Image: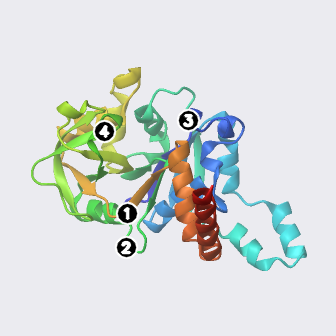
Amino acid sequence: MVRKAVIPVAGFGSRMLPASKSIPKEMLPIVDRPAIEYVVKEAVRAGIKEIILVSHSAKAAIEDYFDSQFELEQQLEAKGKHALLAEVRDILPEDVSVISVRQHQALGLGHAVACAAPVVGEAPFAVLLPDVLVDCNGQPEDLGAMVEKYHTSGVAQIMVEAVPAERVDQYGIVALQGEAPDPGESALMTRMVEKPPVQDAPSHLAVVGRYVLPGEIMEILAQTGPGAGNEIQLTDAIVTLMAQAPVAAYAMRGKTFDCGNKVGYLQAILHYASRHPQLGQKARELMAAELAESAAN
């Protein structure tokens, strides 16, 4: 059963400078909570019980966020702020643990995932990239569906979405045995290409930051040398895995937000603010007023 998730958070977040100079980019708020909380809660809703943060010495704030803070909780209780106290205490269920392992050198996503090998062991696990938020807007959640497909088939699942031609060279692109699957479905892959020129791309289906992988990938990563950018690429390890076992591309239902860049981060704030259960109405009013004022000027 897939009960562990690896979340690589060791990157410096240079695309989000200067905000990320002293604050981990994963801790930048999306409305009223840090981006990392959305990602971790997505994993928990998919049945994950152990969150493994692959971190860096400058990122202690992320692990601290998921720990209890006695002084704060005591103050809130003393002041009778019980609703706020419940929010602070209930960020994660009691049966979910968060641990951290260090990535001492920035040697690529594959290397980051491999740093979690001593904790993952031989178990299957999920990988969630913290820059990517996924909102399924009331539909069955994509990560949960991927985990379920892995449980029933034993086939690794790689989440993909169609991207415009001009963005193909920014992603890992997959080739399939047959037609592209419908949203919420999977199709077997024949190969993956990291950031190909659009004329060489086998499709427009891009890998978008969610993976469900067998434990065997850790041994493959240990034997994978540097690839694109002189880094150890998870894509290369998955290509090796495909020579040994089937791997499927899962077509996502939801909408993604790339919070690793400023435009995507702003888009996520607007999206989640407009749907916030307490703040949504006011947020929509403020957005409409701002647009009207901009148009008038």
Q: Position of residue 149 (x, y in %)?
A: 27, 63
Q: Amino acid at mark 2?
A: Gln
Viewer-nearest residue: 263 or 179: 263
Q: Is residue 133 above or below residue 231?
A: below
Marks 1/2 in contact by CB < 8 Å: the verdict is: yes
Q: How many marks?
A: 4
The span from disc 1 to disc 2 (Cα, nearest Å) is 8 Å
Rendered image: mark on residue 166: 4
Viewer-nearest residue: 123 or 115: 115
Pointer 3 or 4: first along the chain: 3
Viewer-nearest residue: 178 or 118: 178
Whether residue 144 sits left or right of residue 189 in the image: it is right
Q: Which residue is mark 2?
A: 139
The residue depicted at 58 percent of the width and 67 percent of the height is 288
Q: Amino acid at mark 1?
A: Gly
Q: Which residue is mark 1?
A: 254
Q: Is residue 68 above or below residue 218?
A: below
Q: Position of residue 90 (x, y in %)?
A: 66, 70
The span from disc 3 to disc 4 (Cα, nearest Å) is 20 Å
Q: Secondary structure at mark 3?
A: helix
Q: Secondary structure at mark 1?
A: loop
Marks 2/4 in contact by CB < 8 Å: the verdict is: no
